[in-house]
Every structure is written in structure tokens, then in C-alpha cells.
């Protein structure tokens, strides 16, 4: 009976090849035997892993959801269980998802590489980055970074195909679930747990939120990518509800407004509790741009954005913002001001700022020395000793500014390719906002906010860490999918 149900499910999914059926059956048999012989405390974990594997084989979209959920745990696993896995769980799940996608497409005799206007810009940058490894002193560091960008391309292609087959709901659910999980963990760390790393301590029992990223800034960067999208969805469903048409849909839209509002508040709270100034500035910038592009008429949006900015300045000047925000942003302007910090006296108050500027100077020294070739993609850390300032001997892996980092590692050609890529992404997003309606337009506005957030926060950090690049690839795929019609539903004649 179970085998009949399994085969019926495969047929409903359009997967009727004997090889796929045998593969799923083998997973069931092997998993059942493993559960039978394993200790009781390992049975639950084994059952979950087995369910994930079978679910991914049956529908690769399940693999996407699991990939995004477990991806951000890479830093946590490396901290608390080093060497447990040869590579992190997010990478393993992404590989399994791609394999399931490929085999499923071949089984349905319809596997093709989806078309995307972002493929060429992405491949240009990735290709030049790969070329720079020819003169990079540490090939392993360079290869790791090149693989990230290859995975961004693959994640985009997979997401486009998934949206065509199953609709954009799969992608939105995967992103939102991931954000919720990380936000809840961050809020728990910051306020409920009562203990944490000394470096993140704000007061007795109060800490900066850092999720499973083990650092507040990349955690905030991850949350900040999802917050604009959830905000756009909340606003869209609220507007639909206020219009009260059709009347029969009011309860459903009301429920969606409530759910989206709760998720939005969770993400906003987690972002706030990270106490990341780069994240806060990125979020404010994203909100301003979203306000500008939300109305159909741009001049109305710009007017609303100006009003919102004036209100924010008024609240700040009047001391009506929370004291923690005012204190944290008091010297925020210095984050973006470059100056020579050689010989500057270092103290507790300016340490973080001087450290960031010192990393910037090291990157500029690399660019000045090798402006056309760079030092090799991913090799900022490898050559840091040759270009560092005297008081800062320890490399942190990147320049705390993605633009300087790209320029230092890939030279001016690489920086130009990176700028071209993001110019195309922004242009495509704005075009999508103008050409779509309804929920698709709301998501496009949210994606525009996500790109603005990423661009601003990356002025003081590098957010392509801890598998965040997989999320970025998925969001790029979602952007392209919003412009393409879904695949017609399967009928009985296709079975």
C-alpha cells in the first residue's frame, strides 16, 4: 500500500522514471534499517534527515527551503562542532537540491538552463574573478570565493525554474521561514537568554543579537535583506484589505496582514537588537527608496520620501528617538568618511571606527600597488601583511567595505564588472516595478529595498558570508521569475 502511494505521488509530480522511483525506495529502505539499529536518541534526527532527503528527491523545492534554513548555521557549526562535517550543512543541502533538480528535469525530459538577463553580468564578474586566481598567492582562498559566485548563478537558475513550475510561493515561503527562524534566535540571545559573549554585552543580561552567524553585523545583514520584502508584502495586503474588494476575500487578506505584520515586527526587532549601525542605515535607506517607488507616479513617491526624511530628522533633533539609537548613530557619518589613521591614538571609544578605516587603507594600498590585476580574488587576507598599517597586524578576512575589497582583489576591471552587475540588477528591478501589478509589483518593490539595503550596508562590511550568498542568488531568481509567466498546470493527460 505504501509503495502504491509513493508511486502515485511520483506520478503526480511528473516523475515516472523507474530510476527515480528505485532511488526513493532505496532511501526508504536504508533509512528504515538505520532507524531500526540506531540508538533511541538518534532516531529522531535520522528520521528528520531521511524525510528531508526523500522530500528533496520528490520535490527539489523542499530542498531549497531546507537549504535556506540550515545555510546560516555554518558559523555556529564551525564554532561549536568544528570538523563535524566535511563542509557545512547548507552547502551539502544545496548540492543535494541541485542534484535533485537536475535528475527531476531529466526524468521529465524538460531540463534546461533558465534564461535570465542577469546571467551574462554575473558570469562576466565571476569569470574575471576566476582569472585573477592565476596570480593569487593562495589559490584555496580564491577558489572559495569564486565558488560562492558560481553558486549565486546556480541558485538564481534553480529559483527561476522552481517559480516557473510551482509558482513564486515556494520562494517567498523559503525566504520568510528562514528570516523568522533567525530573528527569533537573535531576539532570544539579546533579551531572554541572559548570557552571551562578553564582546556583545550591552548591560547586565542584555546582549547584541547575532543569531547563528556568531557576529552581529552579518546577522543584521541577513535580516536586513528580508525585512524590505516582508514590509512590502504587509503594505500590499493592508492596501488590498482597505479597498475591501472582493468582499469574500477580506478574512483571508486580514489574516495575511496579521501574519505579515507579526513577521515584520520580529525582523525589525532583531535588526534593532543587533545594534549594527551599518544595518540601521541600510534599513533607513531601503525604506526611503521603497517609499519613493511604491506609488505609480514617481514624483508622488519622492514627495512622500521627503516627508518621511523630514519627520525622521525632526524626531532625531527633538530627542524623540530611543536613546540607544541616538547614541549609536551620533557618529554614524564617520563610518563613511575616509581618512589616514596612521598615528591616530586608539581608545575604547574609537577602536571599531579606526579598525575599519585601517582595513580600508590596506585595501587602497593593494589597489594602488596593483590597479589592473588586483592581488587575486579572495586574497585580501593572504597579502594583508604586506599592505597593513603598523598597529593592525591581524587580518579579518576582508576590508569591511565590499567595493574596496573587490577593487583590491580584482583590480579596476573587477570593480567595473561588479558595478555593471549591480547597475543591471537595479535597472531590471525598477523595470519590473513599472511593468508588473499586484503582488508581483509589491515583491519587486521589496527586492529594490533589499538591493538598496545590501549596497549601503556593504559600504562598511562584506555580507557575502555564512551562506548569505545563497539567499542573494535566490532573491535574484525571484526577481527574474516575477517577469515570467508560470508553467501551465499539469493535467491528467500529462500523467
Image (cartoon, helix red, strand yellow):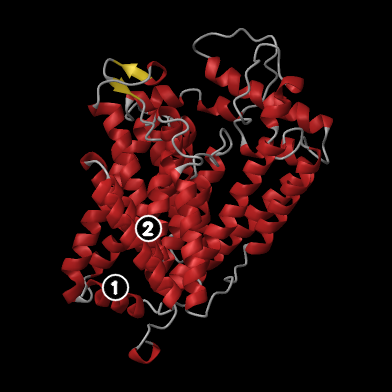
Q: Quadrant of residue 187?
A: top left
Identify whether 350 is placed above or below 96: above
Q: Quadrant of residue 19?
A: bottom left
For residue 389, side relative to residue 25 (left or right)? right
Residue 458 position within the rendered picture, expressed as x and y whole percent measured from the top left:
56, 39
**Along the polypeptide, which appears first: circle 2 or circle 1?**
1
Helix, strand or loop under label 1: helix
Q: For the C terminus, which image quadrant? A: bottom left
**The disc label shown at residue 6, or none:** 1
Task: Residue at 30% x, 29% y: name it.
Answer: 189
Identify whether 384 is placed above or below 131: above
Task: Residue at 37% x, 37% y: name it.
Answer: 271
For residue 494, side relative to residue 187 (left or right)? right
Residue 55 position within the rendered picture, expressed as x and y whole percent measured from the top left:
34, 62
Report crowding for label 2: few under 14, some 14 to 19, many 20 or more residues within 10 A (C-alpha): many
Residue 294 position within the rendered picture, expressed as x and y whole percent measured from the top left:
43, 60
Residue 484 in view: no
Identify residue for label 2.
Answer: 53
Task: Residue at 65% x, 21% y: name it.
Answer: 358
Q: Nearer the viewer, residue 124 or 318?
A: 124
Q: Nearer the viewer, residue 315 or 107?
A: 107
Quick check: marks 2 and 1 in contact, CB under 8 Å? no
Helix, strand or loop under label 2: helix
Q: Nearer the viewer, residue 142 or 38?
A: 38
Residue 170 position within the rendered picture, expressed as x and y whole percent measured from the top left:
37, 64
Amino acid at each position: 500500500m505504501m509503495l502504491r502511494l509513493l508511486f502515485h505521488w511520483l506520478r503526480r509530480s511528473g516523475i515516472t522514471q523507474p530510476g527515480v522511483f528505485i532511488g526513493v525506495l532505496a532511501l526508504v529502505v536504508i533509512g528504515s534499517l538505520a532507524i531500526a539499529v540506531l540508538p533511541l536518541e538518534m532516531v529522531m534526527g535520522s528520521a528528520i534527515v531521511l524525510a528531508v532527503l526523500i522530500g528533496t528527491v520528490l520535490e527539489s523545492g523542499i530542498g531549497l527551503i531546507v537549504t535556506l534554513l540550515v545555510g546560516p548555521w555554518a558559523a555556529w557549526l564551525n564554532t561549536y562542532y568544528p570538523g563535524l562535517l566535511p563542509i557545512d550543512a547548507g552547502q551539502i543541502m544545496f548540492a543535494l537540491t541541485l542534484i535533485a533538480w537536475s535528475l527531476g528535469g531529466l526524468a521529465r525530459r524538460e531540463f534546461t538552463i533558465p534564461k535570465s538577463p542577469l546571467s551574462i553580468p554575473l558570469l562576466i564578474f565571476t569569470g574575471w574573478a576566476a582569472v585573477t586566481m592565476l596570480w593569487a598567492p593562495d589559490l584555496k582562498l580564491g577558489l572559495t570565493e569564486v565558488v560562492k559566485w558560481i553558486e549565486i548563478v546556480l541558485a538564481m537558475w534553480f529559483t527561476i525554474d522552481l517559480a516557473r513550475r510551482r509558482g513564486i510561493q515556494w520562494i517567498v515561503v523559503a525566504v520568510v521561514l528562514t528570516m523568522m527562524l533567525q530573528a527569533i534566535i537573535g531576539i532570544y540571545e539579546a533579551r531572554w537568554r541572559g548570557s552571551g559573549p562578553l564582546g556583545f554585552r550591552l548591560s547586565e543580561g542584555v546582549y547584541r543579537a547575532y543569531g547563528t552567524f556568531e557576529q552581529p553585523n552579518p546577522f543584521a545583514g541577513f535580516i536586513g535583506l528580508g525585512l524590505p520584502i516582508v514590509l512590502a508584502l504587509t503594505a500590499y495586503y493592508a492596501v488590498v484589505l482597505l479597498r475591501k474588494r472582493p468582499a469574500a476575500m477580506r478574512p483571508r487578506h486580514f489574516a495575511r496582514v496579521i501574519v505579515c505584520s507579526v513577521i515584520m515586527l520580529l525582523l525589525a526587532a532583531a535588526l534593532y537588537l543587533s545594534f549594527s549601525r551599518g544595518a540601521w542605515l541600510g534599513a533607513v535607506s531601503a525604506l526611503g527608496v521603497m517609499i519613493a517607488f511604491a506609488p505609480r507616479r514617481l514624483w508622488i513617491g519622492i514627495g512622500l520620501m521627503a516627508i518621511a526624511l523630514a519627520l525622521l530628522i525632526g524626531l532625531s533633533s527633538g530627542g524623540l528617538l530611543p536613546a540607544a539609537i541616538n547614541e549609536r548613530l551620533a557618529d554614524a557619518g564617520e563610518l563613511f568618511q575616509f581618512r589616514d589613521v596612521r598615528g591616530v591614538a586608539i581608545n575604547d571609544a574609537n577602536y571599531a571606527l579606526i579598525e575599519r578605516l585601517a582595513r580600508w587603507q590596506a585595501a587602497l594600498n593593494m589597489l594602488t600597488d596593483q590597479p589592473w590585476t588586483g592581488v587575486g580574488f579572495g586574497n585580501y587576507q593572504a597579502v594583508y601583511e604586506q599592505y597593513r598599517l603598523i598597529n593592525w597586524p591581524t587580518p579579518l578576512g576582508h576590508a569591511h567595505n565590499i567595493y574596496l575589497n573587490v577593487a583590491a582583489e580584482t583590480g579596476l576591471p573587477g570593480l567595473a564588472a561588479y558595478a555593471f552587475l549591480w547597475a543591471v540588477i537595479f535597472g531590471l528591478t525598477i523595470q519590473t516595478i513599472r511593468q508588473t501589478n499586484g503582488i508581483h509589483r509589491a515583491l519587486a518593490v521589496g527586492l529594490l529595498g533589499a538591493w538598496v539595503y545590501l549596497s549601503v550596508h556593504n559600504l562598511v562590511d562584506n555580507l557575502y558570508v555564512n551562506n548569505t550568498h545563497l539567499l542573494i542568488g535566490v532573491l535574484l531568481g525571484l526577481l527574474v521569475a516575477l517577469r515570467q509567466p508560470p508553467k501551465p498546470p499539469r493535467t491528467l493527460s500529462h500523467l
